[in-house]
Image: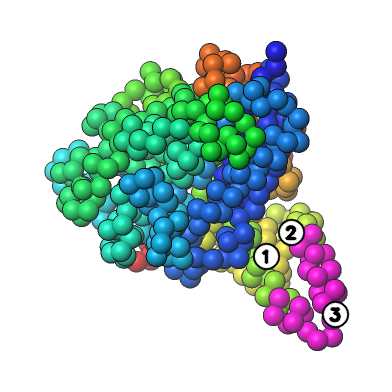
Amino acid sequence: MNSYVIGLDYGSDSVRAVLIDTSTGKELASNVHYYQRWKNKEYCNAVINQFRQHPLDHIEGLENTIKAVVKSGNVAPSKIKGICIDTTGSSPIPVTKTGTPLALTKGFEENPNAMMVLWKDHTAIKEANEINELATNWGGENFTKYEGGIYSSEWFWAKILHIARQDEAVKNATHTWMEHCDLMTYLLIEDKDLKSFKRSRCAAGHKAMWHSDWNGLPPEEFLSKLDPYLAELRGNLYDETYTSDLVAGNLNAEWAQKLGLTTDTIIAVGTFDAHSGAVGAKIDNNTLVRVMGTSTCDIMVSPKEAIGTKAVRGICGQVDGSVIPGMIGLEAGQSAFGDLLAWFKDMLSWPVDRLVLTSDILSDEQKVALREEIDANFIKKLTEDAEKISLEESIPIALDWINGRRTPDANQELKAAMTNLSMGTRAPHIFKALVNAICFGSKKIVERFEEEGVKIDTVIGIGGVARKSAFIMQTLANVLNMTIKVAASDQAPALGAAIYAAVAAGIYPNVIEASKKMGSDFEAEYFPETEKVEAYEELMASYNELSTFVESITK
């Protein structure tokens, strides 16, 4: 008898659910929900790098997408054996003693500090710097060593410390903090004991300095030197963490009724989108999976004996059991990838938005039609013209640090820059420079892994950028001088979450076996163009010179 599972994938702009046949990995149904409050830019201020999301966006998305795939999949509810949720991270949110998101309680409904602090929120740069200073100089264990040796403002403790200092009311009303993947999992299960709830190993190990070497989270002795509040909070957090092949609990009656499922459906331990995406793309040893969207996450796995006790420098963590239980998961990434190109599009759109689309000459219907036409063709036309520019032509050199640098060596204070502009520089030249920049940033990550002795034989691209932009993927193959395969699945992270659910439900014995059966095939392959590789090496040298200069003048 066939059985089915649901993977739920929370991205930066939307959540999508997939209903998957566990015997084949075939997608029976999918549905996407866009966050309305986020779309309206509520609770955000890009000028100060503040990006917050209301939990209702996520709760509404959970209900709408799962109900939709259950209905359209036309599968008996009793045959849907499991659900697993993946999310962005680190995206922590304050909750009450009852596990209620603080933004859903009276007085905090419109307070951005009571919202989820999205992964790309960099308001906690000062606090991250304090953590790094203390970790290096306090005289005890350096708790950042398995986080690449540098703690980022994108991560758990820095964000919490920033909010606690900024908003006394939120601090006092908060019982504990939960990562997004943990909160959504917790909402669905029957057992509401916060202390025994199974928190994600992926989230805790990569973002919260959890490690078995020091029996869990950093001790109160260390945290109290940052702020007494963090030491107090530690007692309301967790000691143990769990991998996503395990059961967090059964679907509770309230949500079973809402979703059209039964309480026999199990809920797996939550995970991060990049980690589940790697599983959906059939990650294996010596394989680099690039999850390419607004930012990138670069995921690898390694046998424990290969890594041993070595702490890989300048990445986003190495965790026993993240990605593939039984192996060491390694994470790196870029703070902006597609976001850099989206910024350029928004900037170029200013005269259209402020002059053309506000003109009285056009009717409202014409304005709508014009906007749709521009959105449909903007990047496409830039790409077509940029592809025509020879590498021998004068091309600007750009940095990809529009949202800081994640890897190698996290530094969210860094800014993007551009040089080699001339009177002949046009928009397609700049677009080509930005595409080169995100690919050069990718090369720096590959170089760091290889410098640290982590071998890369295969590169796999997943996500919207990988599937939609042959120009970017060919450029990346040339810059890396490596062949790149692209996963065919539209929803690789959601598929990976479904794979975890299938293992947690007992349908497969482990994630590797489930991934072989259910994981995505590949739809494209990009090979380095020999005649262009050398030219990109020269451009990369200029990128390195510019990055060294900009870093030297950053204060």
Q: Element at badge 2? A: helix
Q: Along the horizontal axis of the image, is 200 left or right of 19?
A: left
Q: Local crowd at mark 2 within 10 Å, few (<14), some, or many (≥20)?
A: some
Dot 1 amino acid type: Lys
Q: How many marks?
A: 3
Whether residue 36 is visible, yes or no, is yes
Determine the CA span between mark 1 and mark 2: 7 Å
Q: Quadrant of residue 108?
A: bottom left
Residue at the image point whose x is 70% and y is 40% from the top = 68
Image: 236 above or below 240:
below
Q: Element at badge 1? A: helix
Q: Along the horizontal axis of the image, is 319 left or right of 400?
A: left
Q: Local crowd at mark 3 within 10 Å, few (<14), some, or many (≥20)?
A: few
Q: Report the span colored magenta.
A: 353-376
* Residue named by callout 1: 345
Residue at the image point whose x is 55% and y is 48% from the top = 59
Main SS, magenta residues: helix
Mark toward the viewer: 3 or 1: 3
* Residue named by callout 3: 363
Q: Quadrant of residue 343?
A: bottom right
Mark toward the start of the polypeptide (3 vs 2) = 3
